[in-house]
Amino acid sequence: MKKFSLLLLLIPTIVLANIPVKNTPIPGGIAVIDFESNHANPKASYNKVPLYVQHIKDQHYQVLVGIPLMEKLGKKTIKVQDFSTRLLDFEVTKQTYTEQYITLKGKNKKYVNPNLTHMDRIKKERPILSSARKIFSDKNLSSGLFIRPVNGVTTSPFGLKRFYNGEARRPHTGLDYAGDIGTPIKAPADGKVILVGKFFFNGNAVFLDHGQGLISVYIHMNNYLVKQGQFVKQGDSIGTIGQTGRATGPHLHWGVYLNQTVVNPNLLLGKINEI
Ligand SMILES: [Zn+2]
């Protein structure tokens, strides 16, 4: 037995493969920027936020930049840091997202104009959620494209401009998949559970860290099956579909963050025609 564990220790660390993301430099998209470096561990940042850097081959590296949904179009600049500091430009191009009008009635009205007690709770939850989205692990924890967390149809696309009872709200920051309450939700990629909890808007939620600022979130869950700090493998059940928090019906809201910016999860699935 001892010999066996020693052997395991001697096996070299598996080098993780890259995530083959297509260059989609639109608001809510991912800009893929290639560069050369002789450094073993070059770093990059956008507006001072660290970026996802992957090693392609030899001196060829690639940066993945999450572009905010509200980003202005035009020339943007990232900073690459190796033996020196360089600036690299990219261009954000236009994307038109559709609009949706939602009517919330009865007890669901509290989600349109929350009362003081709810506001208090929302304020307390805000820093917990935002610090989870700001986690940056130095190494990538997953490799390759993501898989879908559930099989249901997409009921609400990413980027949809939404109005609750006529009042404009933030555009839709994820993908909604329809599904019956209790349907298992699978981890789309390897990662670490960085947040598990019950929140006012999000209901039961799980946050997974896939490394280097790539974070996926699962919202409105019926229940969760993972603990904070736990590592999950692609395909592991992390919880089930529910209708907790601000949800008009049972569904999974799936969000993906890159450099603290919400991006279209379809890009991680390799689907570029569905944006
Ligand atoms: Zn949603």
Image (cartoon, rainbow, N blue to C red):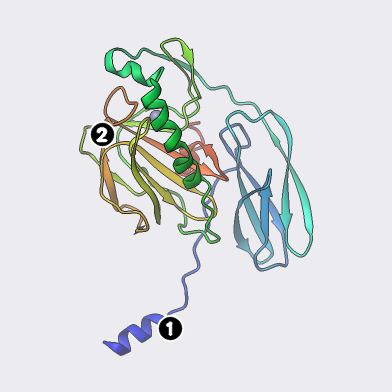
Q: Is residue 69 left or right of residue 122?
A: right
Relative height, residue 173 to residue 78 (above, below): above
Q: What's under tag 1, amino acid-wise?
A: Leu
**What x and y, as percent, mark residue 44?**
67, 53
Where disc 2 sits, the SS reads: loop
Q: Which mark is residue 242?
A: 2
Q: Residue at x 40, y 18 (%)?
A: 112
Of residues 87 and 96, which is closer to you in this image?
87
- Residue 156 visible to an observer of this rendering: no
Marked residue nearer the N-terminal end (2 or 1):
1
**What x and y, as percent, mark residue 168?**
50, 16
Of residues 93 and 44, which is closer to you in this image?
44
Q: What's under tag 2, amino acid-wise?
A: Gly
Q: Which mark is residue 184?
A: none
Q: Residue at x 36, y 31 (%)?
A: 200
Q: Residue at x 68, y 43 (%)?
A: 47
Q: Quadrant of the image for the N terminus?
A: bottom left
Name the residue carrying label 1: 10
Q: Is residue 265 left or right of residue 65?
A: left
Q: Give the quarter the ligand 1 occupies.
A: top left
